[in-house]
Image (tube, grey):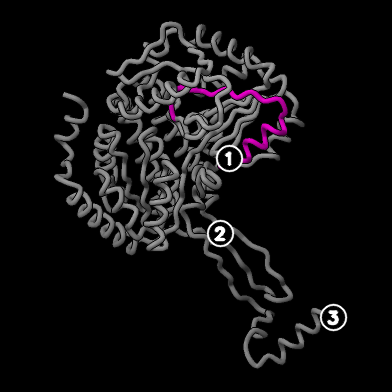
Amino acid sequence: MSILETISAVVSPAASDDDAIKRLDAAYRAQRAAFARDRRPTIEARRERLGALIGMMLANRDRISIAVAEDFGAHPKPASDLIEVLGVVGRAQYVLENLEQWMKPDPRHTDAAMLGTGTAFVDYQPKGVIGNIVPWNFPFDLSVGPMVDMLAAGNRVIVKPSDYTPACAALLAEMVAAAFDPDLVTVAVGGLQLAKAFSSVPWDHLLYTGSPSVGRQVMTAAAANLTPVTLELGGKCPAIMTPGSVTAENVESVIGTKLVKNGQMCVSVDYALVPRADVDAFVDHARTYMTRAAPDYSRGEDCTGMISLRHLDRIEDMLTEARDRQLRIVALEEDGRIDRDTRRMPVSLVIDPPIELRIMQEEIFGPILPVVPYDDLGLALDAVNSGDRPLGLYVFGADKAVTDHVLASTHSGGAAVNTCAIQSALPSTGFGGSGMSGMGRHHGIEGFREFSNPRGVVVRGDGDLIDVFYPPYAKAAGLVQAVLSGS
């Protein structure tokens, strides 16, 4: 019996999306009522909730790796442990270490001439009931991870997992039901109709992670209720190899990042910009790395399967288009092959693809890396800036002035120098996009504040001039004249 069948025997599945939508409505109303009874949880309550979250993840570590492998066809257990479990736990531990400071009122400057002894501060109060629409590529990291920030900020949470990961969705529902009361945290499992209904709920905040096309639909539905949204949307993240940076270590960082989830990661390297004279060296370093580190990659336990046969076919079609154009395609694995049973496939480089190819127009989300030669770094940066702003941008080089210039000349949600993607994993660093790659942030203090209402508060003191704002305005006129005349 599969893990999905086992869990389904415990968790009552929806007979249809209509039933799931009814349960979502009931869960939302229950959480709304619970929040009305407890609008500002104490720090002790928040710490307890984060502790329960940590315990939930650690207790289910093995089951999480089994569920992820079932949904992907193949998935390395160490990667599940590192990203889906320990990444979330580390994030929660970081928040616990800093929560007391974050919850304190944030004092703001006041003009003593106007407000006398009055004071002002920003009070970060919980927003209320928050929805989270989760993608399929990191089913626990992107469901429970943001939950850390949401609970730390004092909110209640309803999670909608992807229907592409049914085993993970069922396990998450069981885990959350065992660890939390449903009026605090619950999971809504269902298909497309539930997803559409989820966006239309009058949330106090809504997080969506996925594609820009669906992000537009989510934002449109949320706008009907003036629901604030955080959108994490990905994009074509470049690795910019500045002159002299095509070294074995740097190329290993690019290719190694591409191997994570076999490219199915929103901050993966989507294409590499390489000085034309260094393209062959880039290819040689990539081959050497794969031969040494992962000679049987697509046949081994370190390769993640494509999430579905449809997605596998999409990636294959991209390669076929490149072959039909008679482009140079470099297989990084000797005798690598596609296994449709596990949906695993090897990594390929496509050298100097024309801009109109799908691999240069779409976010690839798979094991293909276009290598784009350039002759002038400034023109290469112009090409990056002519497209949509990426979620991540990576620049390689030993000359700090050059790498600083690249960072100052480009725009992206996040960035890294001489490495890739790690900016999205730091618990202390806000993670999010810009423009077409998204809006808003989670992780760290930015996440705490994203899911809080920053309420400005003024406490009146003595000796102020507040009454100048009230009619009659003779006193105000005198004050204005005195200010303008400098007296």
The CA distance from mark 3 to mark 2 is 37 Å
Asked if the magenta segment contains residue 379, the reply would be yes
Secondary structure of residue under mark 3: helix
Q: Label 2 near label 3: C-beta < 8 Å?
A: no
The crowding category of the residue bearing disc 3, from other C-alpha atoms within 10 Å (few below 14, some 14 to 19, many at least 20), is few
* Residue linked to disc 3: 485
202 sits to left or right of 483: left
Name the quadrant containing residue 385.
top right
284 sits to left or right of 224: right
179 sits to left or right of 44: left
Which of the pair 106/469 is nearer the observer? Answer: 469
Q: Give the range drawn in magenta.
A: 365-389
Residue at 53%, 44% (x, y): give it: 433
Give the amino acid at mark 1. Gly
Q: In which quarter of the image is the N terminus?
A: top left
Secondary structure of residue under mark 2: loop
Secondary structure of residue under mark 1: loop
Q: Position of residue 160 (x, y in %)?
A: 31, 45
Name the quadrant containing residue 25.
bottom left
Q: Label 3 near label 1: C-beta < 8 Å?
A: no
* Residue linked to disc 2: 105
Q: Where is residue 130 in the image (x, y as percent from the top left)?
A: 38, 53
Q: Position of residue 355 (x, y in %)?
A: 56, 31
Q: Which of marks 3 and 2 is in front?
A: 3
Asked if the magenta segment contains residue 350, the reply would be no
Q: In which quarter of the image is the C terminus?
A: bottom right
The crowding category of the residue bearing disc 2, from other C-alpha atoms within 10 Å (few below 14, some 14 to 19, many at least 20), is some
Residue 373 vertical placement versus 428 (above, below): above
* Residue linked to disc 1: 387
Residue 297 in sight: yes
Which of the pair 95/220 is nearer the observer? Answer: 220
Residue at 49%, 21% (x, y): give it: 325
